[in-house]
Structures are given as structure tokens and as C-alpha cells.
Amino acid sequence: MRVIDLRSDTVTKPTRAMRDAMAAAEVGDDVYKDDPTVNKLEALAAEMCGTQSALFVPSGTQSNLLALLCHCQRGDEYIAGQEAHTYKFEAGGGAVLGSIQPQPIEYEPDGTLDFDKVMEVIKPSDDFHYARTKLLCLENTHNGKVLPLDYLEQFSRFASKHSLRTHLDGARVFNASVQQHIPVSAITRHFDSISICLSKGLGAPVGSLLCSTKEVISEASRWRKMLGGGMRQAGIIAAAGIVALTEHVERLKEDHDNAQLLAAGLQHIDELEIDTNSLQTNMVFVSVDALKAEKLRLYLEQRNILIMPMRSIIRFVTHLDISQDDIKRVVEEIKNFFIKE
Ligand SMILES: *Cc1c(COP(=O)(O)O)cnc(C)c1O
């Protein structure tokens, strides 16, 4: 029986078309900028995001780190959400490798940062007691939530008023643009740099892109080399990235529909509470008694369904390798579990 893996959208396997594109990819030494497939992918990403330039990197963690290193110098500070990937889940890279101080603040329930709360932590630039506040970071989508477009508009005005640079961790920014029925550039235009992941719902095996100005990307290329991210004949993996950006963006809607289908199937189970606020893209957050969550994980694992509860919260993630039939099977098995409990 095949495995239905709902732990994350990072688990997708490259499709036949991706593998064919990878096998046929023209390659060269990307450190010399000689790889035509990498160059094509970078040009495509820059065009989609409406930026001057883009850089192909091994991971989203690296592209976020490059952005921090480019926008901030030693002793500078960036502001990000308390639960932001750039702050919480990237091993403190900005602090370790850039001597950059993070200033986390609580997210609002919709995934935005409140401007008054940001104001309170921006440091006075003329006082040497403080680190210099340089950069504001957002995440879109954040825990499945799409940031409103009018908020992004206000955000970029706020940042320029305070002479701050802006970075978007857009690991799943295409989930946002598809949900809002807009080109991704309508989101990315509000930021000085954008990181996008090809290896999440877009289904590529590896790779992320940092999109920004020529100046930032030139600086980012230097840091990428220093971090060991110069990848030589990287066209082999970039070829899958091109398929991801050209074939797999619009289909994210299927993942969003499957998330809705899953939520609808689970909503009548008394022991489960669905977070409807975050049910916007390809994630379903469900609260359940923590002991039951672990029992359910084991029960489903024995039936080739993988989930990853975090204490009392289960995050189900739909993606390229999850079909409507899979969702129906998952709902049935979860119902069975609670009938037996
Ligand atoms: C996955 C992810 C990243 C980058 O992760 P990598 O595993 O390093 O590619 C960054 N931000 C968010 C919000 C993510 O979900």
C-alpha cells in the first residue's frame, strides 16, 4: 500500500516530467555563471517576481540567511515574528554568521506584524546603546495564512518611512498568490528581497531562489560561495525548478481544495477542533488531546499514513503527491480511530 505523507509539502518526489527535464538538462559550471539551465531558472524567477535579478541556492534557509547578510552588517538588527522561520527555525544563522541581532515580536493572529508593536522595538538610530535596526521580515504564507494585499502596501510604506529594508520569506508565496488569484509579483513588489522555495508544494527535489536587485544579488553570490553554496553543474536540479515554476504553480489550487476537503471531513469528529482561521491554503491545523494525538499518529502509521503532531496540534499538509482519494482514505481512517477510542 502506498504511503500518504501529510507531514509536510517538502516530502514531494520529482515527477516524471521533472526527471526527464533533469536528464536532458544542458549544464555548465554555475560558479563561472556558465550553466544555461541555472541562468534560465534565475531569469524566470526574477521575471515572475518582478526583480532585477535572482540567485539559485541549495535551500530556503540559505536564501533567507543571504538576505540577512546582504541587508545587515555586524551590529545591525532585523525584526521578525516570534515564530518566523528566519528567526526560530534557521539555527540562529544571522547571529552566528553575521553578528546580526534578531528582534522578534509576536505575530498578530492573521500572520501580520502590528505597526505599533514594530514601532516600539525600532531602536533610536542616534544612540550608541542600541543595535541599528535595518530590516523588517515577513513570511507569506505563514502557517498557511495569506497576508492581505492592503497590509503589504501599508507595510512597505511603513518600512520606507522608517528607512528600513524589507525581506519576504516567501517559501510558500505561490500558495498565497494562487489563493488571491493574482500574479506573484503583486505580492513581491512590496519587498526589497524575496526568498522562494522550489522544494515545497512546487515539487522540486531541491533548491530555493533569492530574488532582489542586481546589487543585492551580486553581494549574495559572494556570501553563497563563502557558505559553500556554489554548486557547479547545478543545472541538473535547476531543470526541475523550471518545471516547478512553469507547471506546478496553478495546480497549488488542488492542494488548497484538498485541505478544505480534509477539514470538511474532520469537522464532525467531536474530539478534534479545526483552526478555521488558518485554513486558507494547503495546511489544516487541528487541536486534539496530546495523548490522543500520539496514539492517532501510531494508528495511522500502521496504515501507511504519516502525520507529525506537535504536542496537541496536528498540522496536515497537502501537496503534489496527495490526491482527493488519499484525503478520503485519511478521513475514513481518522473516523475509525475515534470510533474505537
Ligand atoms: C521550509 C521553509 C523555509 C526554508 O527551508 P529549507 O528547508 O531550508 O529549504 C523557510 N521559511 C519557511 C516559512 C519554510 O516553511
Image (cartoon, rainbow, N blue to C red):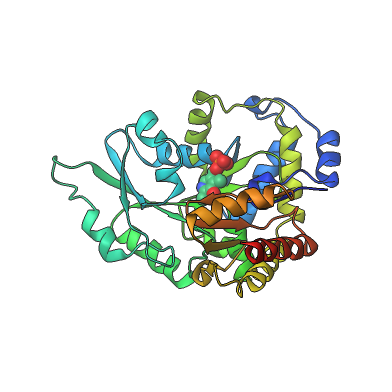
**Quarter the C terminus occupies:** bottom right
Find residue 186 and report its horizontal and vertical position in percent: 56, 65
Splitting the image into 4 quarters, where does residue 33 fall? Answer: top right
- Residue 52 visible here: no
Left or right position of 265 against 310:
right
**Does residue 288 appear left or right of residue 338 in this picture?**
left
Q: Residue at x 74, y 37 (%)?
A: 37
From the top left corner, tell me how far across and down residue 4 is, in percent. Answer: 73, 51
Regarding residue 164, the answer to whether it shows in the image is yes
| Towards the viewer: 234 or 280 | 280
Q: Nearer the viewer, residue 212 or 247?
A: 247
Residue at the spot 74% in from the left edge and 27% down from the top edge: 28
Ligand 1 found in image quarter:
top right
Q: Is residue 218 above or below residue 6?
A: above
User: Which residue reaches farthest front?
Assistant: 340
Percent of width and height locating residue 86: 44, 45
